Image (spheres, grey):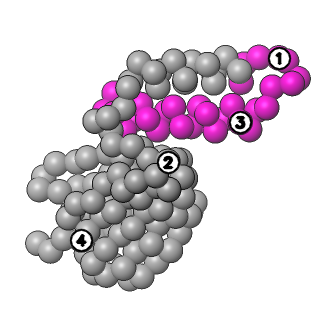
Amino acid sequence: MSTLRLEVVTPERKVYEQDVDMVVVKGVGGELGILPRHIPLVTPLKIAPVKAKKAGSEEFIAVHGGFMEVRKDKVVILAETAELGSDIDVARAQQAKERAEQRLASKQEEIDHKRAELALQRALTRIQSSGH
């Protein structure tokens, strides 16, 4: 089976670069599965885990927004922030999730609900990407 190169890049560094069998992402229009020789495509991404399938295993990368460009033999994800699932501090992500949930449950009017919702999405993505 042929493979494609997956690169996940943030403004600070290249987070991931491997040959993979398939990439699964959540675009703004829904979930997308990308195989080698896919038609060219550019799409914005949601805050969600990216799944890289290779050699019968799966790796997860927490991606916090950005864009994906698909070429026939390469997928490049330009993310605001990203981290490998294996690098995630699950306890810290769980604490961030709980803080965001408390903010959203608060009846105080000065709470920025959109910001709290985004924080909750980022925390959930980190937890999901870590395998927990």
Q: Amino acid at mark 1?
A: Lys
- The residue tagged 1 is 107
Q: Is residue 21 above or below residue 107?
A: below
SS for dot 4: strand
Q: What residue occupies the far front of the structure in this picture?
A: 12
Q: Nearer the viewer, mark 3 or mark 2?
A: 2
Please tell me which of labels 4 and 2 falls first in the chain.
4
Given contact means CB atoms under 8 Å apart, are the residues at marks 3 and 1 in contact? Answer: no
Calculate the distance from the C-alpha at mark 3 to the C-alpha at mark 1.
Answer: 15 Å
Q: Is residue 27 left or right of residue 127?
A: right
Calculate the distance from the C-alpha at mark 1 to the C-alpha at mark 4.
Answer: 48 Å
SS for dot 3: helix
Q: Is residue 101 above or below residue 128?
A: above
The residue located at (36%, 46%) in the rendering is 61
- The residue tagged 3 is 115
Calculate the distance from the C-alpha at mark 2 to the C-alpha at mark 1.
Answer: 30 Å
- The residue tagged 4 is 4
Q: Amino acid at mark 2?
A: Thr
- The residue tagged 2 is 81
